Amino acid sequence: MLDDHAKTSATPLQIATHMRDLEAQIKTCQLCRLAKTRTNAVPGEGNFRAEVMFIGEGPGYHEDKQGRPFVGAAGQFLNELLAIAGLSRETCFIANVVKCRPPNNRDPLPDEIAACAPYLEQQIALIKPKVIVTLGRYSMSKFFPGERISQIHGTARVVDGLLCVAMYHPAAGLHQASLADVIRSDFRKLPVFIEQARKMLAPPPEVVEERVVEAEAAREFVVHDVETAAVLEPLPTPEPPVVVQEASAVYNIEDTIPDAPAAVEPSDVPPTARAAPKPKKAARKKEEYTQLSFLDM
Ligand code: URA
């Protein structure tokens, strides 16, 4: 798994690769009894660079059939709630506490939750959301242990450096009509929480500066073919400058050549004997390559 430092410098491609590996592990997982009754594991889906991650309880009937989270009736309501908050399934990431459906939609058992926990933790570590929204009791108790959803729904708390928001599970709004509007109004607060999290997690200016310098340095090594857009090998390192030999070795022929200089400083060596001047880096690059922009990397 990537540690914090690696995540900071991981490229989107590296993150996507890790996420795909994790998905493959989840789909073939045999760590608990739910593996025996599932049709499909449901790893989760959405944007790997999401600012907001939603965590539900576990797949239901439709999710188990399709291998996708929140695609049944609760999922329809979740889509409406996302729109209320100005979000979409494409901009956020949706996962569950357990990745396989408990038979007959029973509650997940503690050992099933524990077996599945590393998957969720790796997803959080890779995506690095700014806000985690818990949907229902099981994900709430991971981030707000000992709390009651009826007391803390629609409120946020900083947990492990992330802003966590406790929400009722969308299914609660389907089963109890009076809760649907409560849930809608809780979701209306989300943009404010997201803005707070952005401010809270904005890196200090010196870190921004450091990342720009790192990105600039990395850019030096990424070159693009103008026509094919293929990434090319880095430019060859220029030949090392010719080291001017000891003056005596070059001119140790005083006996035969009259007036040969007794000692020669490198600056006195005729231009033909010196290293050819390095072409200017910028000009050379312009000639042969178009660099990827820092944002393309
Ligand atoms: N309920 C959940 O908690 N998760 C799903 O994916 C679907 C329904």
Image (cartoon, grey):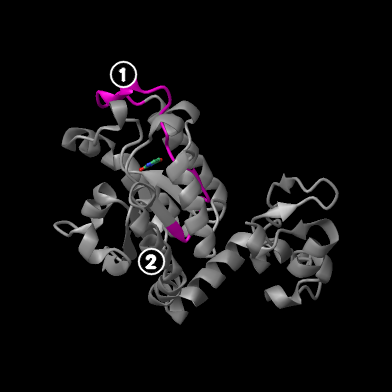
Query: Marks 1 and 2, how far apart in space?
Result: 37 Å
Give yes or no for residue 26 being in the magenta stretch: no
Q: Position of residue 97 (x, y in %)?
A: 31, 43
> Where is the C terminus found, in terms of image quarters?
bottom right
Q: Is residue 47 visible?
A: yes
At horizontal 34% and vertical 30% (from top left) the residue drawn is 101
Residue at the extreme front: 177
Question: In the rendered image, which quarter is residue 184 located in?
Answer: bottom left
Ligand 1 image-quadrant field: top left
Q: Is residue 2 visible?
A: no
- In the foreground, 133 or 295: 133
Disc 1 residue crowd, few under 14, some 14–19, many 20+, Cα 10 Å: few
At horizontal 46% and vertical 45% (from top left) the residue drawn is 75
- In the foreground, 106 or 58: 106
Q: Position of residue 258 (x, y in %)?
A: 81, 72
> Where is the N terminus found, in terms of image quarters?
top left
Q: What residue type is disc 1 on?
A: Lys
- In the foreground, 159 or 134: 134
Residue at the extreme bottom: 205
Residue at the extreme left: 146
List the residue tagged with mark 2: 186
Mark before the other along the chain sequence, 1 or 2:
1
Secondary element under disc 1, as helix, strand or loop, is: helix
List the residue tagged with mark 1: 36
Secondary element under disc 2, as helix, strand or loop, is: helix
In this image, 115 relative to 272: left or right?
left
Q: What residue type is disc 2 on?
A: Asp
The part of the chain drawn in magenta is 29-52
Could you tell me what secondary structure mostly forms the magenta stretch? loop
Question: Of the residues tagged 1 and 2, which is closer to the observer?
Answer: 2
Eyeballing the image, is 69 above or below 6? above
